[in-house]
Amino acid sequence: MASYIQDDQFGNIVDYEEIRSTISSVYDLMFPEYNLLAAAEVASDMAQDDPSYSITIGASALAYSILVAAGETEMATELKDKIFTLGWTEEHVGSDLLSIKTEARPMSDDPDNREYWITGGKWLINCSYHADYHVVLAKVDPSQDGPRSLSFFLVPHEHTKNWERIETHVLTGMVLTKYDIDGPGTLVGKLGHGLSLVQQMAMPSKYQCTYMGIRMMRSALPPSIEHLGRKVIFGNNPLDFTNVFRQMYDLVLKAGFYDFLFHRAIAFNTDGFLQFHGSILKSFLLLRINELLSKNLLVVGSKGFTRESPVGQVVIDSFVLPVFDGHYTINTLMTTKHAQRYLNAETKVDMEERLQTLRDRIYIRTQHGEIENQSRAIRKPPFFDYAHYLNQFRMPLDIDPDALVQSMRDLYEEISERGLSNDPEHRYKIGDLIHWMESILAAAECWKLMENDHFLNMVVIQYNGFVNLFNEVISESNLSTTFMTPVRQVQSLEGIDDVPGFLLQLLDVRGAVLKIPTP
């Protein structure tokens, strides 16, 4: 796919007809059974990792998932060859859905009526001009703004009008518009359950958006390594220079770990961890990927700016992800709500059992039915004793898990005592620190699975990232909590003959994990 057409009205855009002819292969993985990872992989393969295509397909898939979440089996079955658009945001309120003004008036007095006349307008909506159906969020009573004020309606495309394309700086192959709605639509799900359906759809969507970042990372790092291994400066390859080798080593360890962190979330995607891991991926991980791709471009240099190289393009495209589909601040603040429970959990879990879960599930297209999780069932993730778990790894590093957790508790308590716990800046920082803590656990699991001591440096990198932010919070807010000390990396980079081969092997965490024999 990923071929563009010259449209008379919009210029060079994605081929919506081609998408329409093949998108059922994505829907088939969402209904009747919902397989999140498989659907994301197939959609990315269809798009050939082109972000304009990926986001266009993803937007239609997310709108289709509302039908699945609402239990509209007849609609979901009959409309598998259609493009959908998700009409929820409005220009005057952005993502404040409870303040939308689009109205739905019942077309009869029948208590079982499902037909409504929809009037209103939507803004910054992908696929809207080319969609067959619009899954529209509206209010039966516009004066209400409570959680039961919203409902979803399926509106055929012919009942929308006044489209106006919104030009963007990047991803210009998509067609984002604002438009008006004036015509009949069919109720989707139960009246007043629109917000709960949004929440059901939003959790899996966190994975879809971040998966695009993972694919960008996979496409950028290998060409960088290969280019730096071929290029000659002063008679040597850049990778022969210690500073370049060290920088690429750091980027490769991070990239391998980020790929692992994403798929680890899928493997542990049960119970309330759907919400917790999803919040990490769509805030912490997306931002880390942005940083990595930017640094990768700086190391590669001018070659990364050329048209044939994906290195520079993915940097530009990656910054769209947290903005276009991320709301990374909101997701970090969601994690802050869990901070006390995360830090004070007493349930004990066994390291070997969790590692076996990873061996069995990670990188595997397991069907988990994430869209079926009700929001009320995932509000309290089943956290466990952090220090007890991390102590089981017996890592040969100067990291004391009990001291780590106690330091975080001390910081949290001082912020609360000083009346800063409701301050948005400090709430965000607390959530970010919890994400860093969870990344340390994930890095320890990766090291233990891989049995490769270079991956101990993954743990060091994540631990030092936590320490840097921890100390920054203390310094900027003039707190009295004791500063933490970073730790040193442990593996030497001396005596490596085939540097490109070594880096590419480290990068392939997925391949290495899948080769691990199951005990």
Image: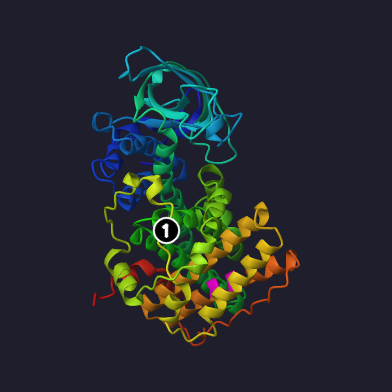
Using the image as rendered, state which of residue 79 and residue 196 is in the foreground.
196
Callout 1: SS: loop
* Residue at the image position 36 percent from the left and 49 percent from the top: 40
Principal secondary structure, stretch drawn in magenta: helix
Query: Residue 266 at x, y = what percent?
Result: 36, 58
| Local crowd size for mark 1, using a 10 Å CA cut-off: few (<14), some (14–19), many (≥20) | some
Q: Is residue 442 magenta?
A: no
* Residue at the image position 53 percent from the left and 77 percent from the top: 460
* Residue at the image position 49 percent from the left and 65 percent from the top: 342
Q: Which residues are magenta?
A: 461-466
Quadrant of the snapshot with the N terminus: top left
Q: Residue furthest top?
A: 108
Quadrant of the snapshot with the C terminus: bottom left
How many discs mark residues in the rendered view? 1
Query: Residue 313 at x, y = what percent?
Result: 53, 50
Residue position for label 1:
381
Q: Is residue 198 above or below residue 166?
A: below
Using the image as rendered, state which of residue 139 and residue 449 is in the foreground.
139
Q: Identify the amino acid type marked 1.
A: Pro
Query: Residue 233 at x, y = what percent?
Result: 60, 72
Query: Residue 78 at x, y = what percent?
Result: 24, 29
Using the image as rendered, state which of residue 73 and residue 19 is in the foreground.
73
